[in-house]
Amino acid sequence: MHLLAGTGSLGRFSCSAALVCFAGMDVRMRQSGKHDAGRHLSKVGHASLRKAAYQAALGAIRSKSRLGEYYRGLRARGKPAKVALCALARRSEEHTSELQSH
C-alpha cells in the first residue's frame, strides 16, 4: 500500500528500473581519476518509499519465499548482510513494478 501511496500510480513508470531510480535504490559509481570509492545506493529519490522497501525486505528474509531464498543465496556467496538486504529490497521493487505492468 505504501508503494502506491508514494508513487501515485505505478503505470507512470516505463520499466522496473524507472521505479527503482524513483525510490533512490539505483547504484552509483563514485570515482575520480584513479580513485575508485566503489558503488553505493544513490539515495536520490523518495526516502519513505526506499525505507518501506527496506522494511519489507527485513520481513522477507525470515520467510521461506523466493525472496528469502534469494537473500540466503547472496549471503552464502559471501555478500555482507546489508548489501544482500539492499539487493533484496531492490529486487522486491522490481517485482512489484513488473506485477503492476501485467
Image (tube, helix red, strand yellow):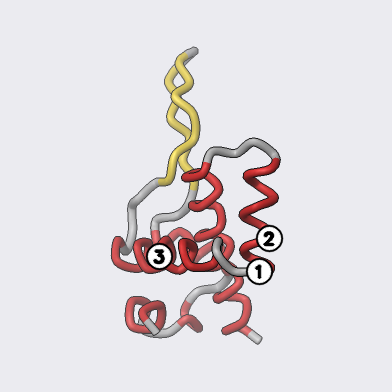
Q: Secondary structure at mark 3?
A: helix
Residue that mark 1 sits on = 64
At horizontal 64% and vertical 36% (from top left) the residue drawn is 78
Tag of residue 69:
2
Q: Earlier in the sequence, mark 2 or mark 1?
A: 1
Residue that mark 3 sits on = 55
Q: Earlier in the sequence, mark 3 or mark 2?
A: 3
73, above or below 23, in the image? above
Cα gap from disc 3 to disc 2, whole angstroms: 17 Å
At horizontal 36% and vertical 79% (from top left) the residue drawn is 2
Amino acid at the residue labelled 1: Lys
Q: Secondary structure at mark 1?
A: loop
Q: Splitting the image into 4 quarters, where does residue 7 fall?
A: bottom left
Tag of residue 11:
none
Cα gap from disc 2 to disc 1, whole angstroms: 7 Å
Amino acid at the residue labelled 3: Gln
Lateral position of residue 3 relative to residue 39, left or right: left
